[in-house]
Image (cartoon, coloured by chain):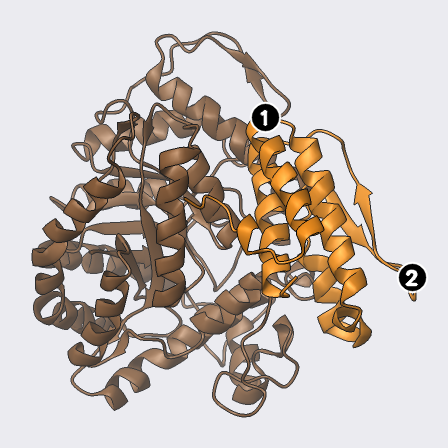
Chain colours: A brown, B orange
Amino acid sequence: MKFGLFYEHQLPKPYDSDQWDPDAEHKLLKNALDQVELADQLGFDYIFEVEHHFLEEYAHSSAPEIFLAAASQRTKNIRLGHGIALMPPRYNHPARVAERISTLDLLSDGRVEFGTGESASEMELGGFGVPREEKKLQWEEATRQCIRMMTETPYPGYEGAYFGMPERNVIPKPLQKPHPPLWVASSRRETTMVAARLGMGSLGFAFEKPEEAAERVKQYFEIVREECTPIGVAINPALAVLSSLMCCDSDEEAMAKGVEGTQFFSYSLAYYYNPFTGAKHQPGKGHIYRKFKDTPEEERMGMFGGRGRGFGGGDDNKEPEDEVQRALWRAAQRGGCIGTPDFIRETLLKYEAAHLDTMIFVSQSGNRKHEDVMESLEMFGKQVLPEFKERHKEHQKWRDGQLAGVDFEINSSI
Amino acid sequence: MATTNVEKIQDEKLRETMATAHKALKEGDFLGVVQRAGDVYLELLKRKPELLAEGGIPARMRIMMFPRLGAHLEREEDKPPTVVWDRETFGFSEAVTYFEFAVDQLVAEGL
């Protein structure tokens, strides 16, 4: 199994102030670069950086290509993933995405992972004028054309439902041929199956349990073998899932340092994706962290389908039925990767047994301290990661077996 | 080999409908896929009235769960829900989304 870090660049406002400190965003990004540099030295395989717009406190990561470019110059081996680039053309013209992906691939000596997606929050869709009911179709059209721009000389031009352009040679071309590995954000099982059918890696944001991952892995590879019609020139058969990481000497210490950040991650995500709260957010004036702190723990899940539902135990602690709600719920739990190295190892062994390709950790979240994140990365990187890295060859053999008979060209970093 | 969970659908008629939808998906009839997904989801809600009986957020969630990608569900008070069509052309990824959603719901509800 491989390991990555997931960056939203979360920045809760100080509880007792309506605005951030003037230097807060500067410090946040510089700290994140330090974390990425350390992760590279420790042998982490990936960072995946989101693209979100206007989601104050939840994600100050609106220009991932800039952050990844900076990271490319401070790291040697870690792969640089868009997790994801927003593809509907009103967010990013497909030619501009192709140019940026290729430039980053050249600057990083071929370390780019091209994650794609469409976003779901009203703040973003409404902000850029993307109709919700068209976003997936826009994603599909733009992604197909963007890949053609990276691989065809010249790009012959296109007139589609959502964008068009005349014949042009879109340059530069990426270093990785025919193009960097392709991924799509999958917060629902349905999208994982879309990924398999289009030959894309599935960046699973559903906080899946190992037994669910096992079921998805099996079906994903069956579809790749039997029903795949690649969206690109090369396929990237790969499955990644998300979990929250805080690795410490004791479970108590890990929970003290890690759980509030995890809960804020989930709370703020739910806030923006819930049409009853996210659509009514007052730009520049809201204070999600204060709301979060002022809401009793047992009521923090109320906004997404569980009135009176808390993050902790209790009789009403049933998982929500809807998959996205469930993902948010799980994201708020302690999860299997907040604890001691032994505790985390036990969890990861179950995912390894399920043949999961990649585990991506939310490490920076909420008010977690930079120093705590660094120590946690170091402890995990030295005490847990190496044995999984060593066994990865066995997983690759298993994977080769799964892909036996697949005739498509493959470009995958798994 | 199972590339779908259609075989896990217990009800013969619903299973057949979704098997036909799978065939339509492979043949590029994306509208046909979405129509069948809508039909079986409405049938599920009809056969399991308790899913909407509670009212409030759980019932609203049941309606909102149906993907909103060119066709969505609406429900007037005390009437059964209906599929509302925003358009009649669908892309591959949209069709897969509706298809997988419908199959998952049927399997999860034991139909």
- Residue B16 x, y percent position in the rendering: 66, 44
Q: Assign a secondary structure to mark 1.
A: helix
Q: Chain of mark 1?
A: B
Please name whichever residue, A353 or A141, is drawn nearer the observer in this view of the structure. Answer: A353
Which sits in the foreground, A34 or A82?
Answer: A82
Q: Position of residue A238 (x, y in %)?
A: 31, 45
**How dense is the environment of label 1, judged by Cα within 10 Å: few (below 14), some, or many (20 and up)?**
few
| Residue at 35% from the left image edge and 59% from the top image edge | A214
For disc 2, the chain is B
Q: Which numbered disc flags the more N-terminal residue, 1 or 2?
A: 1
- Taking the image as shown, residue A294 lies to the left or right of residue A334, namely right
Q: Quadrant of residue A353?
A: bottom left
For image coordinates 44% across by 41% down, the residue present is: A195
Classify B104 as above or below A134.
below
Image quarter of residue A63? top left
Residue under numbered circle 2: B79
Give the x, y percent position of residue A133: 68, 42
Give the Cα distance between marks 1 and 2: 35 Å
Residue A411: which numbered mark, if any?
A: none
In the rendering, at what x and y percent does residue B72 appear? 75, 48
In the rendered image of this protein, does residue A255 appear above or below residue B2? below
| Residue identified by numbered label 1 | B27
